[in-house]
Image (cartoon, rainbow, N blue to C red):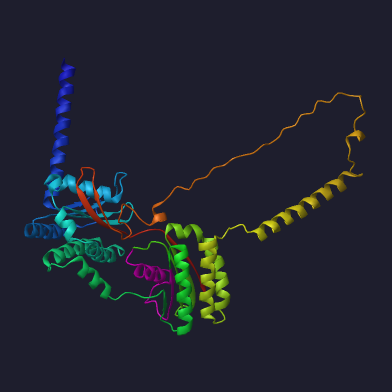
Amino acid sequence: MKKLYTYLLLAMIWSCALFGSAGIRALADDAYVGIFDDAGILAEDQKTGLSSQIQALEAEYEIHLMIVTTEDTQGKEVADYADDFFEDHNGAGTSGAGLLLLIDMQHSELYISTSGEDIIHTFTDSRLDSIMDDIYDEAVNHNFYGSCQQFLTGVDHVLGGPETSDTTDETESEKEPRLLGNVLDEAVLLTESEVGKLEQRIGELESKTGFRVLITTTNSTGGKTSRDYAENFFKNHNDSGRVRNGLVYLINMEAREIYVYAAGNSVMESFSEANIDKMLDRIYKKVGDGKYYKSCDVFLDNVERYGVEGGNKLTAGRLLLQLAACMIVGAVIVFFLARNRGGKVVAGVNNYFVAGGANEILHRDQFINRTVTRQRIKSDDDDNSRGGRSSGGSSVHRSRSGTMHGGSGRSFGGGSRGGGRKF
């Protein structure tokens, strides 16, 4: 009986500790209304400032606003995680209307979840894209506090601005200046005609490959290495993060260096380090002689070679060469084996067996076939989308509870590789 009391006492102490810590955590969350920084990427003073902004906006517009950071989406797609989180924490159940900014550090994803018919109607695709562009520009430089500020500023701008229709939004966005073309010749190494030819060819290649292809020349990298300059150039010209996969060919006249930068998992599958080294070897032969346009042309030849045709494609000519080589090697081996054994090769079973002299049991092992099935696991980069909006698209969908949600997403990370040569 005494042992039973002891167990009960321990259980009570454990329960008090558990609920006490939960209460302390709840109080900590209450200190920063609307901020759920599970990834720990915001400083205390930053959370205080953002929380004050959220409370002011919520009071003015009577909506719910949340900023969530996480390193674990619990196996959910980014859109599902954001929608579920909003419904669980909006203080008004599934009827609450508002917006949530999710910074997913696990997958390097940004996502804005919108909830409520009025909010979804007000925050059109073009408006969400505009807000996400500003958020993305800060996130790629790891200024996540700046991303949060841009989110709240964008919300205030949309809700506090004049009523405009979707048509007006689209018209205004069409008037915004956009980067035209894929070739930026700041070092003036190419003629207008050569740039035009390269632009035309790049357009054809992009439609075939589905990834971004950029060429740039410069006389100054602003103190950056060729790699950093090429990486920043891609980030600044990849449609604000909507295009994850691409290649950059940089001619750095300041350092007398050429550099090929590859970004995105699907691109890196085709453009391995070995393939990029081969590309640079071919390009270097031209740029070393001052043939800059020709070096760009060779670069595009290799983009087509590895990105469209595939670097390891087995053509009919290559197959015949391989068969011929195998036959020659086989003949040489047979010749030397026969020569080393001495005598001549005699064919015919009667030379070795006397008819009726022995009963031979013949054994034969016959290899029929082998079937190997391989199926590539589809990744997020294959369709360049995640959770409906990760690459800049738009969707209105129902969450697990049946609530309507909209959203906008963008990736701010991903793998990359590159290689360079001095000239």
Position above or below: 7 against 388: above
Q: Quadrant of the N terminus?
A: top left
Look at 52% across and 45% down and name the residue there. 374
Residue 417 placed where, x, y %? Answer: 45, 62
- The location of residue 237, given as percent across then percent down, is 36, 70
Q: Is residue 371 left or right of residue 168?
A: right
The stretch drawn in magenta includes residue 102: no
Picture layout, residue 284 above or below residue 313: below
Residue drawn at point x = 45 percent, y = 67 percent: 206
Q: Quadrant of residue 356?
A: top right
Q: Nearer the viewer, residue 29 or 359?
A: 359
Left-right relation of 162 to 216: left
Nearest to the observer: residue 182 or residue 332: 182
The spot of residue 71 in percent (x, y) is: 29, 50
The magenta stretch spans residue 235? yes
Tell me which residue sits at (39%, 68%) in the image.
234
- Left or right, 196 with respect to 166, comes to right
Q: Which residues are magenta?
A: 213-241
Is residue 127 something one can see in this rendering? yes
Left or right of residue 2: residue 191: right
